[in-house]
Amino acid sequence: MNKRKKKTGTRRRRMQLVTLCISTSMVLVLLGLVVLSVLTSRNLSVWVKENLTVTVMLSDDASVNDAKRLCKALYHRPYSRNIDYVSKEQALKEQSAAMGSDPSEFLGANPFVATLELQLKSDYANRDSLKWIVKELKKKPVVTDVAYQADLMDEVNRNLTHINFVLLFLALLLTFVSFALINNTVRLSVYSRRFLIHAEKLVGASWGFIRKPFLKQALGVGIIAAILAIGVLGLIVYGIYYYEPAILAVINWQEMVITGVAVMLFGIIITAVCSWISVGHFLRMTAGDLYKI
């Protein structure tokens, strides 16, 4: 009979540990997603800004050599990230394919001009920097005009700032919620052994001695839950990469490693802290209080 009760108690504790690991890992997955989003938000900002294009229109009499010399000069400027030369013929070909007809057939001439598609470094993709960049470009003899979507650029910068604030708020909120959820789960696990804690206290065991096995268990649960969470996060990132390989421009190994370390540390620290608090709660209770909860 005693053996059966012992086996039942052991099986129950194992199920509690499994439940604790799963629930903790689910919370850590959510926290890891927010941490990864916060870390990659800057990369997303850089990627979006560097893909905004400034169109530099060249004069009709500008030769290919003139365009090449201008490209070479612009490549040495601090704001240039990439420059593509689009000739008049290439522009006509692209627009004809887009429109489904050749505009030169009814206009009698090629209406398009050669252009340079300039992509800026992210630090210069703002209205203030573009003002002096446009002035500098217009001073070039072969440049007739410079076009860019100022409103779109302002909207991108404004939206990215809002996204960063929202992600930071979610990170703080989820940290608090995660602590509360894991703390409740750990407390339920310790609750089933509250009489054992009281018995050890009665025979003279120190609080540190009583806490020690619970802390070891909490550390093990935190490590296992963190490993499970990191595995799930890795699968999520791989799934995104499988459908959109360009995501590597935003999510790189550095952010993934930092996220993994953050999840591991959070899993270990929060389970240990919650275990310390929960065991301390029952250590301070009297025998009569234990029966009332």
Image (cartoon, helix red, strand yellow):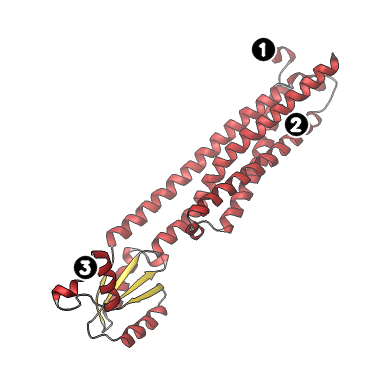
Nearest the eye: 17 or 80: 17
Q: Which residue is mark 1?
A: 292
**Label 3 crowd (10 A; few <14 / some 14-19 / many >=20):** few
In the picture, measured across the screen, residue 151 lies left or right of residue 203, that is left
| Quadrant position of the C terminus in the picture | top right
**Label 1 crowd (10 A; few <14 / some 14-19 / many >=20):** few
- In the rendering, at what x and y percent does residue 221 appear? 70, 36
Q: Is residue 82 above or below residue 151?
A: below
Image-quadrant location for residue 124: bottom left
Q: Amino acid at mark 3?
A: Ser
Q: Amino acid at mark 2?
A: Phe
Q: CA distance from mark 1 to mark 2?
A: 23 Å
Which numbered tag is attached to residue 137?
A: none
Image-quadrant location for residue 50: bottom left
Q: Amino acid at mark 1?
A: Lys
- In the rendering, at what x and y percent does residue 17 appear? 70, 30
Q: Secondary structure at mark 2?
A: helix
Q: Are marks 1 and 2 in contact (CB under 8 Å)?
A: no
Q: CA distance from mark 3 to mark 2?
A: 76 Å
Q: Is residue 68 above or below residue 3?
A: below
Q: Which residue is mark 2?
A: 214
Q: Which residue is mark 3?
A: 101
* Dot 1 or dot 2, earlier in sequence: 2
- In the rendering, at what x and y percent does residue 69 appear? 36, 86
Labels in figure, total: 3
Q: Is residue 17 above or below residue 144?
A: above
Q: Is residue 181 above or below residue 144?
A: above
Which is more foreground, mark 1 or mark 2?
A: 2
The residue depicted at 33 percent of the width and 87 percent of the height is 65
Q: Secondary structure at mark 1?
A: helix
